[in-house]
Image (cartoon, rainbow, N blue to C red):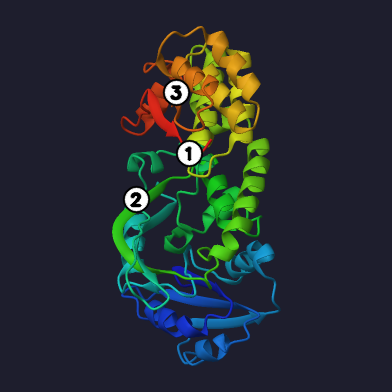
Amino acid sequence: MTPRVSAVAYVHDYARWVGEVVESVLGQSFGDLELFFLDDGSTDGTGDVVRRYAADPRLRYERQERRGRERLHETFNRCLQATRGELIAVVNGDDVLAPDKLERQVALLDARREIDVCFHDARFVDGQGRDVAGSFRPDLDLALFESGRLGPEMFDRNWIPNPTVVFRRELIGRIGLQEYGWAHDYQFWLKAAVAGCRFAFLPERLIRYRVHEQSHSTSSSRLSRLTAEVQRMQREMRARYTIDELYPDILFCGDRERARAVAHADLGLKLLASPDCRPHLALAELRQAAELRPDLEGVRNDLAVALLLTGDGAAAAETLHKTGASDGPEARNLERLRAGVREGYELMAPGDPGEELLRLRAGSYRGYHRAAVLGLLRDV
């Protein structure tokens, strides 16, 4: 009989934690599940620990030759292809599940058929299990995640914490398998968001999320490599989609050329305002916006900031000068630039607060909006 939930875990050298993880999955209050553990060439006895629980028929353990982080998407795809449940729960090999985690997520997905993915908050702990600061709660309007309009926001950052998700297997048929090694989960959820998938968030902390130097995603030694991989992935994913695919509400705008300009400017703004600022990607979007509608409010200001961040201060100054602004962010930014100041540059939202495209997007997720001036860039 096919289980409803397939819990999948891929591990490498997690013998220290994996036993507690197995127990937390097999001890779930929702018991109609299978647990598939794929060992990526561990050498520390991880397999021996997992096999202690082999008496439970819901557990399957397989080992493969080490593929490593660069081929992590292949490892995860093997997990997906080896399991059968209509719902897939991602389990980290070092994160312990709350007893009712799957019960809570399955109940939500059963009650709301329009939702494709359910994710939740976590209790952050260190390698010794001590509480540390951290949260997965998004600082966006949660209705945005449920609207099917999350695509552009996913170029800002990965808003979907992979080890918390349960998603419908049918999603794979819509968007395909994972494709990128180091950024495998980010790219997968970006694809899902652009395809119009709907995400629901539970505020409860339903796993103990371990932050330590051996982690796939939180170790300091891996962060620089991951950042480079994310940048490459974002460039390739942006080239995959038209602006109309990222902003489907363009179709419903009276002036579609202006709407496209606003969309390019809005995406450029997201890339600049991201915690991991992407000035080169932003520059391409803002240039496109300025070409379509050079008079669009805010676009030349943000274009100048992108130019400055990519090292072209002269072009930034010329762009700000052409706005002719005597006050406001453009004027203040030009003054900073001329004074040689290296921080405090302001960003502006494109157009005016009543911009048609932004109103349509806001209407799709209950009044979400951007402020007229988003804030200040530091460390230019």
Picture layout, residue 152 above or below residue 220: above
Res 236 → quadrant: top right
**Location of residue 335 in the rendering, given as x and y in whole percent from the top left corner:** 48, 18
Secondary structure type for disc 2: loop
**Which residue position is annotated with label 3?**
348
The Cα atoms of the two marked residues, 1 and 2, are separated by 23 Å
The answer to the question of whether label 1 and label 3 lie on touching residues, with beta carbons closer than 8 A, is no
Looking at the rendered structure, the kind of residue marked 3 is Met
**Which residue position is annotated with label 1?**
153
Looking at the rendered structure, the kind of residue marked 1 is Glu
**Location of residue 84 in the rendering, given as x and y in whole percent from the top left corner:** 54, 69
Picture layout, residue 52 above or below residue 357: below
**Which residue position is annotated with label 2?**
112
Question: Which residue is pictured at 45% across the width and 81% down the height?
Answer: 17
Question: Which residue is pictured at 55% across the width and 30% down the height?
Answer: 268
Q: Name the mark nearer the viewer: 1 or 3.
A: 3
Q: Is residue 163 left or right of residue 268?
A: left
Picture layout, residue 331 above or below residue 242: above
Secondary structure type for disc 1: helix
Q: Residues within 10 Å of mark 1 (few under 14, many from 20)?
A: many
Label tally: 3
Question: Which residue is pictured at 54% across the width and 82% down the height?
Answer: 60
The Cα atoms of the two marked residues, 2 and 3, are separated by 37 Å
Picture layout, residue 320 above or below residue 265: above
Q: Name the mark nearer the viewer: 2 or 3.
A: 3
Looking at the rendered structure, the kind of residue marked 2 is Arg
Does the rendering let one see residue 92? yes
Q: Name the mark nearer the viewer: 1 or 2.
A: 1
The Cα atoms of the two marked residues, 1 and 3, are separated by 17 Å
The answer to the question of whether label 2 and label 3 lie on touching residues, with beta carbons closer than 8 A, is no
Front-most of residues 165 and 140 = 140
Q: Residues within 10 Å of mark 3 (few under 14, many from 20)?
A: many
